Amino acid sequence: MAPRRIPAPNRGAAPAPIILLRCPLQAGGVHAIIRAAIPMNVIDLLDRDQRKEKVPDFRAGDTVRVYSRVIEGGKERVQMFEGVVTMRKGSGSRESITVRRVAHGVGVEKTFLLHSPRVERIELGKRGVVRRSRLYYLSEKVGKAARIKEKR
């Protein structure tokens, strides 16, 4: 008997489809309801394979250290970039963050792909208290005005 699909009620995020299967292990071969996360196409499968398993939980306003691999000449080394996360956008393997810091009086912003093999690891420093998901206003602030309150 082929599995039958039952549409799940739509409440916000799309839930995994419910599939009815005949279970020989149960008495009398009673149908069992199994909620399975089945990707609908090949792109979702590839996207899921490209993601890193360990990405810390952080958001805009947090101070992070991003360790990325840099190739100079023929040598590869790990370079650390510490700053405030000004935005986090995208989803899945295409998710990226923009980190801003002031170096020698000049504001520097770098964008990193979270699940890129070039990004070795991300460490969370301080948690910031902000009310926005994109902190564009930080680029205009200088010195003490550019500080973000720390979450206690």
Image (tube, rainbow, N blue to C red):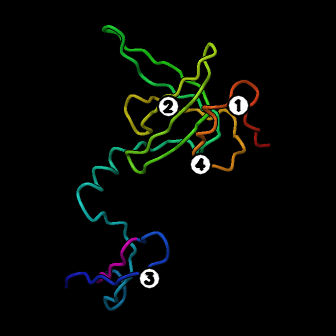
Instruction: Give the CA separation, mark 4 to mark 2.
Output: 22 Å
| Residue at the extreme bottom of the image, as rendered | 28
The residue that mark 3 highlights is 9
In what element is the residue under mark 2? strand
Mark 1–mark 4 Cα distance, whole angstroms, equals 16 Å
Q: Is residue 143 above or below residue 138?
A: above
Image marks 2 and 3: residues in contact by CB distance under 8 Å? no
Residue 89 at what x, y percent from top left? 47, 46
Q: Is residue 28 above or below residue 87?
A: below
> Of tags 4 and 3, which is closer to the observer?
4
Could you give the CA–CA distance between mark 2 and mark 1, rounded to whole angstroms? Answer: 26 Å
Three-letter residue code for mark 3: Pro
Point 32% across, 7% down: residue? 73
Please identify, in this view, whether the residue under mark 1 or under mark 4 is nearer the observer: 1
Q: CA distance from mark 4 to mark 3?
A: 30 Å
Marks 1 and 3, the one that precedes in the sequence: 3
Query: According to the image, label 4 marks what residue?
Result: 133
Residue picked out by circle 2: 121
Circles 2 and 1 in contact, beta carbons < 8 Å? no
User: Magenta span covers which residues?
Assistant: 16-22
